[in-house]
Amino acid sequence: MSEPLFKSGVTGDEDPEDSNELIYSLDTFAEDSIQCMALIGELSTIGDNQSSGDDNKVERICERFDYLISKWQTNPKLIESHVKHFLDAIIESVSTSAAVDGQRFTAAFTLMHRLVACIGPKSVRRYLPTEVLWLSKLVEWCERQTPEDTKSWPTRAMLLLWLSMAVKTPFNLKKFDSKAETTSAQKTLVERIYALIDRYLKATDKSRDSAAVLAAHFFARPDIVDQLLERFMSESLPVLDKSFGHVMAVAVLLKVADRQNISPFAERVIEVSAKMDTTGRELMTKWKVKLIGRSALSLMRPRIAKWRYRRGRRQLSQNISLQMADQKPAAIQSTHENTVEDLEDDCDYSDIPEQLEVIIDSLLNALHHENTIVRWSSAKYLARLTNRLPKEMAAEVVDSVLQLCEWKDSDSSSHGCCLALAELTRRGLILTDQLPQVVDVVQKALLFDELKGTFSIGSNVRDAACYVCWSLSRAYDSQVIQQFVHRLAPTLVNCRRAASAAIQEFVGRTQVFPHGLEVLLLTDFHALATRSHCYLDIALKLAQKPEFGDCLVQHLVDKCQHWDRDVRELVAQSLGLLSTVIDMNPYLPQLLAKSLSMDLNSRHGSILAIGHIIGSVGDKISPELREQMESIAVTLNEKKLLRGIGGEFMKQALSVLIEKCSSVSLSISSESKVIDVWIDIICNAIVSEDQKTRGDAVVALPVFCYQYLRNRHELKTKVLDQLLIHLNSSKESPRIGSSMCLQTMSLELLDVQYYNTCFEILLAHIRSGDELCGSRASEVITLVELSLKFRPIDDNRRQQIVDCLCLALDDRTKDSRGDVGGTVRLAAVDASLAFINEATDGQVIDVLKLMTTQCVSVWQKERHKAFNVFKEIVFGRQLAQIDRQFMETLFESTGDEKADHWRPFVRLLDVPLFTHNVWKGLAKNVSNPTETYVRNLLKQEIKSMDGRVFNAFLDLYEKADQSADNLSLHCIHCSHFLLTSCRTDPDFRHRVLAQTWTAGGRTRDCQRLIGAVDVFCAGVQTDDYRQSMSYLVILLCHAFPRIRTHTANQTYVSLLTADDSPEEALDLLTQTDWSQSLDVLRPIRDQICDALNVAKPRRKATGADNSAK
């Protein structure tokens, strides 16, 4: 069945044709494996001596190898089949290296470390060679390493890891020592390895981890235990609190050594570990838990508790025979007879350590630790230890864990307790009479969600609770947990992705989960990834099942007070959908009570829910409940709960309630008072700064006015006058809210005089060009929508609307937020499409010309919208000035989306009607260094165009200074592109250089100046050499040192590529420090002018000079 923790991989129901799924197969890594082997093979071309060329090559090989390997870090099993080949090739490179500190030697072990970092040291160790000949070599190589060298730490770490495998040789290590070594003062092999361990356990890099593994396997050898284990433990235990390396070494030793050899030291380890202060050291705390847990396990004989709950037998054939005989499963038959004692001896618990209480207490305390890794370790060792205890003691452990599940405590303790329960459950260590308590805890944990500061906590608790459910379904028989499934199933359904594996396990193993297969298909892990899909689609389908409907509704009613606003809104929408299949009258009293609660979240969520329920069921609600709903707004207003920050939430929720009541034509009793309050709420909400509140009020007001104020002239006039006041405001929010309301206001509520007044106000705002772009965007659309309601439109007003559209299409307002005028342009594009049928052909052409600029905008959203609208207008209306057949050919699809968008508008440069406006947009794209596609396309297409296209660019360039969108800078960059990439005539180059000097050379804008220098340097490569150099030599003595330096560097590069450049000028450009004072630099600049035969710049006469004259 499924695993509780999901791993990357392919399952049988995945579609291999789905490109959105990452599909793995056995040969997926094959291509990358070939590249990795080629990179390892390149190591043979690297010399042992240090050289800059080899340094670059090593860096390239390592980076590429790391990239290829890291892609598979989420699924390392696919790499394991290739690991042996990688290691063989790496070790071959190591063997052929002449120097231990050579580049090839170091690079080989760097690649090995990248492999270890990806798939883990355990997977790599098993493939390392352990032949006898390697042992002495590895010890020698390790001794020749320098621990102080910070660059070679991967080499040391991998050598020690390899040595940890080599020391497992079955031969006695004394046989590796020569007679001279054993009789002289020279160290033996054992002493040398001990010295290496002692040295590297004190290191601070990754070699410490490898040294810990080496120490464990070295001291676990039978020939070393009697000789050095006592010495090592006596040296390590006093420094455990200070040396992290010794902590790791002892912990790994407790795991790999024989229990009889290590148990004499276990009590001392527990005593020392319990006293260790690991506050603020998370890794140390994790290994402390491992020390305590492994020491306790080493003191107790391995056994399978005879009293634990057992489900089935180990052998499948025995289970099948039991099922056929309709018998209950008997005791588990162990397959590990050599490591686990016979079940008959399980009653002998004489090996239980005296420090058991200290051990259990330490592990229980670790369940509260803030680090997840510590809690995981504690839960695992607590369960393993419980498995070796008698029934009474184990029950006390389980009770202690259950007592720790105080949900008012931190999420860390809740998570740790659930992990411990899951591990205990998975091993069958929770007896059937304790299961009800466990299920109670799990039910609470599945709904655990709390606000902590600005974020939520509890997802890890819910995941752990689902892990408990997963364990229950695996460890216990369906008859045992059947009574709990109906309690857990609704809660699991509420829990989204974390419950997916648990539900799958319940359905597959117990076969008592209600509507198991249908729920399993609905609650697929990927289907639950989107929260809105869960609340609005899956919940509706599950609610149609009798077992889940009421539970889901009650869960959503309880969740109306969630701290997250988005969740409350989803809950409300979900309840509205569920009300179509479930009677909501029993639940509405709870929501009505919460709607008047003092808790803001409860009020907000419940009012939203009531509104959506009304929108779904309408008059099906009982009259008593309907009367209470009507009074919500009045009561909140009387309690003054519609003010302040909380008032914004209430206005938004009540706006939804009003809109839903209006949309279903809900009859209102005692209308006068309720409607007056509703009017005040909506009129205040449409001017709110909160976009959500304002948006819901804008939707509600037109519907409300049509339903309840259509025949109430005084109230209708009051609302419309209020809208007019807001529309004429100087603030952005009132203008946005009122203009958006007018867009959807029914024609029955308006008259011509009111329209004329609104039209003049809207016209003045759009023409003002103020910085309130949000309001102007809304007002452009309102101007068009409102005018279309009062058709026919006279010629004068039609021209005014088109002028406003053109003004909005060319809006380039900028502020601290950036190009805020973009919102106005987007709105103008939509408004143009709506109004285009009312405009004359000439007016349509004016709009289309401006829209072509948006079609080649740097902003993708604007570009795509304008492109679609442009095509719709061009092909939806016959225009005399546009060749319809030419346009159809131009916009013919080629299958390449990018080409289909850009190529037509680049070719429109050759159409005089659109040339100027297309250049205006293209200049910005060409100046963008990332738009290589546009640059290449323009370079290709402009070859077939005549000089008129270049003249149009010059006209734009000369008028660019009048633009507010930094168009001059874009034109400077575009000029550089045209000079370097396109064939241009001398007159164009001369005018471009002159205009660049005007636009960029005479400013104090560094960006323009740098761009101008690049243009002049491009001119040096043409026959305008003398004109370009005359500008450059002036900039060599610019007031800004940055500009002087940049000019000198670029001029030098340009002169290098030019013919017959004098050496004297080149030397002066490179050897001069251009950050010096101008008095020093001007004579040098004059020498450069003489060398290049360029006229020397003349200084402008200052005020002092004029006085002297």
Image (cartoon, rainbow, N blue to C red):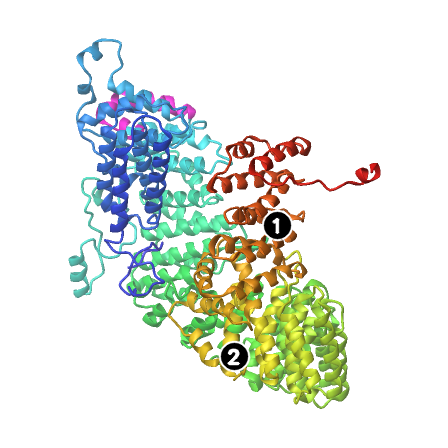
Q: Is residue 662 left or right of residue 866?
A: right
Residue type, numbered disc 2? Ile
Q: Nearer the viewer, residue 662 or 55?
A: 55
- CB-based contact (under 8 Å), mark 2 and mark 1: no
Give the magenta-colored segment's residue range: 215-239
Image coordinates of residue 928 in percent, x first then y, are: 52, 55
Q: Which mark is residue 537?
A: none
Q: Which mark is residue 1008?
A: 1
Image quadrant of residue 565?
Answer: bottom right
Q: Is residue 237 magenta?
A: yes
* Residue drawn where x is 21% and y is 40% of the image: 339
* Residue 909 higher or lower than 1065, as above or below: below
Q: Quadrant of the N terminus?
A: bottom left
Q: Which mark is residue 882?
A: 2
Label the magenta part by its dominant secondary structure. helix
Q: Is residue 856 magenta?
A: no
